[in-house]
Image: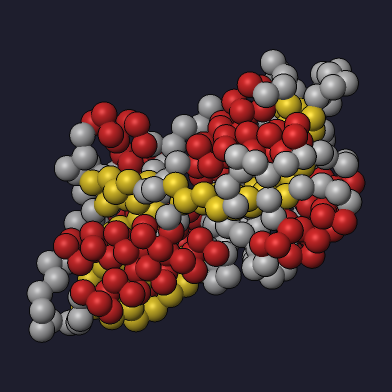
Amino acid sequence: MSSLRKLITTVVSVGVVGALVTGTVVAPAAHAANKKIAFVMGAESDPFFQAMKVGAVAAAKANNVDLIWQGDPSEYSPATQIPVVDAVLAQKPDALVLIPTDPTALQPSVAKAKAAGIPVINVDTRVGDLKDVLSFITGDNADGGAKAADALAKAIGWTKGKQYKVVVGLTSATATTNVARLDGFSKQILRHYPGIKIVDKAYSQSQPAKANTNVSNWLTKYPDLAGIFAIDGTNAAGAAAALQAKGLTGKIALVGYDAYKANVDLIGKGVFTALVAQDPAAEAKLAIEYAVKYLNTKKKTGIKAAVVIPNVVLSKSSSAADLAKYTYVQK
């Protein structure tokens, strides 16, 4: 089956949240004056994007927008995303909100939208050249990486003069979020924690099972491994499963990214030392609001070219209220 036929497509109409379906489109209710905004994410199964969907749906309903929601079911890859964008543009949306899986590979998709007169907003990740992008909305990824380094150093009991091996699990070598988080993590270690060495990196394409395999391989390759930085939620889920399966909970420090409910629940059990939480629903909500504002006025007034939303670090010391507040919503 082709990747395009495997697409998960949802269209949300005003007052009606379409059911999630595979390979079909739920036609919107008749609202002739409504604007149609397409939202193309990375991997539909990722709880981060499911939380984004909650924010996008809410904003679409509030602004009388017909929302086209599309993405590959599970694979975070430009190879699967580019056909999705092509299919979306063929529907002639009034605006496109795009989470590029690769900054270079998706640049022509942005140019294609621009040529068709369709404004583009990037959320979470970005294309390399933002000249044709109305706004870029994301979390503070470099800061999140630095905070993860602080948490991991604390968890492994970093002491000056000692040596520690750590590894990093990523989804993609080119996704701008992963690149920025790794950069922030690496620089913080270099500046403040001499002796901590990143001995390996591996990629999972946003698939927890692959992340699990990567960590299992590391546990064999590095018997003296001190810690793991799982750079996003799917890698965090896979890493947690691997450590639990090997009976290594609390013996190898694990710092993750993204507040998936299942991962947040594991903080109290000692599987995660800390999780860096974003606000995906807020990112998606703002993207829809910006798109509507631009479509209504054809002006950039009140639309910021770049928006960075702060992160929050969750740990055992976090209050129950904060854990609940920052856990990613799903429906």
**Residue 287, can we see it?**
no
Applied colour scheme: secondary structure
Q: Is residue 279 visible?
A: yes
Residue positioned 61% across, 59% down in the render: 126
Give how far across and how far down residue 238 sits, in percent.
Answer: 43, 56
When the figure is inspected, residue 18 is found, relative to residue 181, above or below; the finding is above
Q: Picture coordinates of residue 22 (x, y %)?
A: 75, 38
Q: Which residue: 23% across, 63% down? A: 150
| Relative image position of residue 105 (x, y in whole percent) | 72, 68
Pick whichever, 56 or 246, lies toward us: 56
Q: Quadrant of residue 96?
A: top right
Pick whichever, 217 or 30, lies toward us: 30
Q: Residue at horizontal 57%, vertical 35%?
A: 285
Q: Nearer the viewer, residue 258 or 140?
A: 140
Percent coordinates x, y for residue 128 in the rendering: 64, 68
Query: Which corner quadrant of the image does residue 78 belong to?
Result: bottom right
Is residue 100 toward the left or the right of residue 124 in the image?
Answer: right
Reply above or below: 120 against 202: above
Residue 183 drawn above or below residue 290? below
